[in-house]
Amino acid sequence: MKAQQVVTMGVHVLDVLVRPVEEIPEGQGATLVDDIRMTAAGTAGGTALTLAKLGASVRTAGAIGTDPTGDLLVQLLDRAGIDTGSLVRRVDTSTSASVLPIRPNGDRPSLHLLGANITYGLDDVPWDALAEATHLHLGGPELIGVDVAARILSYAKEHGVVTSMDLLAPGVLGSFDQIEAALPYVDHLLPNDDQLLGFTGEDDLLTGAEKLRAAGVGVVAVTRGGDGALLVTAEGTETVPAFAIDVVDTTGCGDAFSAGYLRGVGLGRTPGEAAVLGCAAAALVAEGLGSDHGDFDLATADEFAATRKPRT
């Protein structure tokens, strides 16, 4: 089997995480916190981090600024062993960033700057590298436009590349026409439950997933937070439970699930087995602060999945 070579393309964000935050001080008040961290994140950047930990060869592609925020984001990705040569730098647009005040229970409201992510286009795509990859993961297609996303995904499919796609916007901002044209070229779609319902306009997950499959998607793997994942394939449906852990921070858990799932696919595992690895990766990230939490590899994640109890 050819070694897994993944291109993660799309949204790159620098997260500034503060924990714990029960409330924002009024006026010019101040409060002490336990931790402030900065990490690479986003549906492309965050997924790349965990894929690299799990042993995939990863090149990441997207648009960031030439500002110090972008410099730090590149440094963090480089340190994780990710090829950042396909990141384009914009001189007139800031790097995307988020400030995340993490609640004591792990909830994470966000203050977000879209930044350069929305400027990525066809002229920026590393077509040669994409053709040589085994896998393309496109994160946040709604930011670059469905026609651009469809062109990128169709090119990948033409060159025998396995494709996957994740969404960024919350379901309330989603609509089917934002993604429909790209769906025939998606082997694995990885939304969360809120996104699936919002983007399909359906009232239940199974009906929404079947609508996506009817539009051309191969496998729909829906994350459901603490309830794990729902898989909808041509063979039927399968539920995969989350693992019982003490949650510190849910930032990056969806991206970690995507990475674990895609690593499993690259290793020839079934969608159900891949989703177990995805849930393990998400749990390992949720035990600490930020998308890059956890000093784990594939063997560690597999052992975690084999020995830890599912959440009930």
Image (cartoon, rainbow, N blue to C red):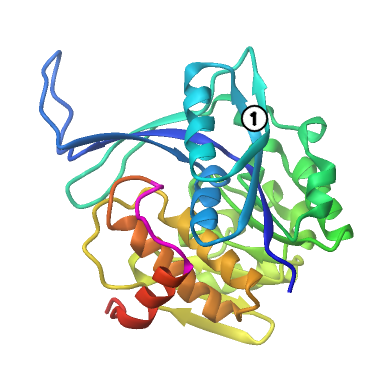
Magenta stretch, residue numbers: 291-298
- Amino acid under label 1? Ala
On-image quarter of the C terminus: bottom left
SS majority, magenta: loop
Residue at position x 55%, y 37% in the image? 12
User: Where residue 54 sits: x, y (%)?
Assistant: 51, 62
Residue at position x 68%, y 34% in the image? 85
User: Where residue 106 sits: x, y (%)?
Assistant: 25, 51
Residue ranking furthest to the bottom: 235
Q: Which of the pair 105/201 is nearer the observer?
A: 105
* Residue with the mark numbered 1: 63
Secondary element under disc 1, as helix, strand or loop, is: strand
**Image-quadrant location for residue 111:** top left
Is residue 195 something that shows in the picture? no
- Horizontal relation, residue 30 to residue 169: left or right: left
Number of residues whose C-alpha sits closer than 10 Å to that of mark 1, classed few (under 14), some (14–19) or many (20 or more): many
Tell me: residue 151, above or below residue 210. above
- Horizontal relation, residue 247 to residue 55: left or right: left
User: Where residue 58 sits: x, y (%)?
Assistant: 63, 51
Residue at position x 78%, y 37% in the image? 125
Residue at position x 59%, y 65% in the image? 262
- Horizontal relation, residue 247 to residue 259: left or right: left
Q: Which of the pair 268/15 is nearer the observer?
A: 268
Tell me: residue 45, above or below residue 218. above
* Number of residue marks: 1
Q: Which of the pair 272/70 is nearer the observer?
A: 70
User: Where residue 153 sits: x, y (%)?
Assistant: 78, 52
**Image-quadrant location for residue 3:** bottom right
On-image quarter of the N terminus: bottom right
Is residue 86 something that shows in the picture? yes
Tell me: residue 110, above or below residue 132. above
| Residue 53 within the magenta-colored segment of the rendering | no
